[in-house]
């Protein structure tokens, strides 16, 4: 089930440049199962068109108290709108809108609906840095917070004025993340940081050839999706793959070689709560990379191979409070080899799958896994989809209160 399945969300858009981001917010919320209706102030239509928002939300966009396009004008009932919504998000909330909300002014449909709303209200301010820090705006923001509104923090960076500083509206995927967290307060991994590696790595021989393997990345991507659905903030470091994933809780870092993956892992690992090394990292690479394409001149080509960086060994040796899971793909002596890897790499658990099992391994959508805990307890599971395997793996992790 999607994180916002069945939730009714009202989006109020006021007249600021950040309104151009609101179509992305609508798409994010719908992607997670929400039903969206959009209200706009008249000035907001200067920055984003009602047609765009209507097409994305699949609902009429309202911007006035009456629908005057009909021969007999129809009242747009702000009371019904306020009662319909499970949550009202006002984004962007300009200085003028914040002031009107704080003082109870009611000169447009967005404000009237705010004053009638019985649901939680989220506010995403957006303005220039000097306006944002002005005492009057800070007073209004604090006043709105005291009324029980959820005030989302502003971002920092380039502003429409050409200046740089605080005042940017929170990015659409971050707003969606906050809304998801609000509706799912008891998720077992809420706010936990999870690092997952996925896919193969490629080690260049020359500009057109490489050493690699058949890993599709499906298992790692399934784990990332499950972690995000459980509330985690996920960093997915992936080698070359055709897999696609989009979730406001997932940051994707693309790499090509083992060395690139190692650099990325070092950047994120120390601030991680749970790390799952699901990538099929190349164990060897050519001693030298030829800068020009190797021409076929004889029937023999000799490559000198040297070991790549052992990423999992690094993670195990630098482990502090992280809960570290590895993967073992075996062809023989599977349990013994997996236990040895579990011990040698200083892991808290290892996921074993064997190429001897039909339907398991690389490039397929199913897997048959055995989960071995650090205490040597073994749990075997039947052949199932990699999505279901991901659920099983996190159940095993959570059973140890990671």
Image (cartoon, rainbow, N blue to C red):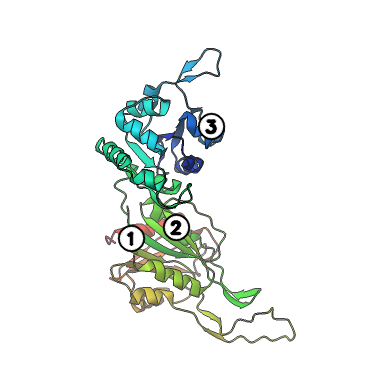
Classed neighbour count for the residue bearing mark 3: other residues with Cα under 10 Å, few (<14), some (14–19), many (≥20)? many
Circles 2 and 1 in contact, beta carbons < 8 Å: no
64 or 273, which is in the foreground? 64
Which tag is nearer the camera, tag 2 or tag 1? Answer: 2
Q: Earlier in the sequence, mark 2 or mark 1?
A: 2
Say which residue label 3 marks.
50
> Which numbered disc, 2 or 3, marks the residue that appears first in the sequence?
3
Q: Which of marks 2 and 3 is in front?
A: 3
Element under label 2?
strand
- Which picture quadrant has residue 353? bottom left
Look at discs 1 and 3 and give the one toward the viewer.
3
Compare residues 168 and 348 and report the one nearer the observer. Answer: 168
Residue 396's tag is 1
Query: Residue 370: x percent and y percent?
Result: 39, 65
Q: Quadrant of the N terminus?
A: top left
Determine the residue positioned at 43% across, 38% down. 34
Which residue bears the numbered disc 2? 251
Task: Give the residue drawn at x 35%, y 47%.
Answer: 153
Q: Position of residue 182 (x, y in %)?
A: 33, 43
Can residue 286 be seen from the camera position used here? yes
The x, y position of residue 181, in whole percent, is 34, 46
């Amino acid at each position: 089930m999607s994180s916002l399945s069945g939730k009714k969300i009202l989006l109020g858009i006021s007249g600021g440049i950040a309104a151009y981001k609101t179509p992305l917010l609508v798409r994010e919320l719908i992607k997670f199962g929400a039903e969206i209706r959009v209200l706009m102030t008249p000035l907001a239509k200067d920055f984003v068109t009602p047609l765009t928002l209507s097409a994305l939300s699949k609902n009429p966009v309202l911007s006035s108290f009456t629908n005057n396009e009909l021969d007999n004008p129809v009242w747009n009932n702000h009371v019904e709108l306020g009662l319909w919504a499970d949550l009202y998000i006002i984004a962007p909330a300009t200085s003028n809108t914040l002031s009107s909300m704080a003082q109870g002014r009611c000169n447009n449909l967005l404000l009237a609906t705010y004053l009638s709303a019985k649901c939680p209200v989220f506010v995403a301010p957006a303005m220039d840095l000097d306006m944002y820090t002005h005492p009057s705006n800070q007073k209004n923001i604090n006043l709105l917070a005291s009324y029980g509104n959820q005030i989302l923090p502003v971002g920092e960076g380039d502003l429409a004025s050409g200046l740089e500083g605080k005042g940017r509206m929170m990015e659409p995927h971050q707003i969606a993340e906050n809304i998801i967290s609000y509706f799912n307060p008891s998720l077992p991994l809420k706010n936990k940081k999870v690092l997952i590696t996925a896919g193969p790595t490629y080690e260049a021989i020359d500009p057109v050839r490489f050493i690699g393997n058949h890993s599709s990345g499906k298992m790692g991507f399934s784990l990332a999706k499950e972690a995000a659905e459980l509330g985690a903030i996920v960093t997915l470091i992936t080698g070359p793959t055709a897999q696609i994933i989009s979730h406001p809780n997932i940051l994707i870092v693309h790499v090509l070689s083992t060395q690139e993956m190692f650099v990325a892992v070092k950047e994120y690992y120390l601030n991680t709560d749970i790390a799952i090394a699901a990538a099929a990292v190349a164990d060897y690479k050519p001693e030298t990379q030829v800068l020009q394409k190797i021409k076929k001149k004889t029937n023999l080509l000799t490559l000198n191979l040297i070991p790549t960086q052992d990423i999992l060994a690094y993670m195990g040796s630098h482990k502090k409070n992280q809960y570290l899971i590895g993967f073992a793909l075996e062809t023989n002596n599977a349990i013994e080899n997996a236990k040895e890897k579990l011990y040698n790499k200083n892991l808290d658990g290892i996921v074993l799958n064997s190429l001897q099992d039909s339907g398991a391994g690389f490039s397929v959508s199913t897997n048959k896994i055995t989960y071995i805990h650090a205490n040597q307890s073994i749990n075997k599971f039947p052949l199932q989809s990699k999505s279901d395997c991901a659920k099983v793996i996190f159940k095993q992790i959570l059973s140890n209160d990671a």
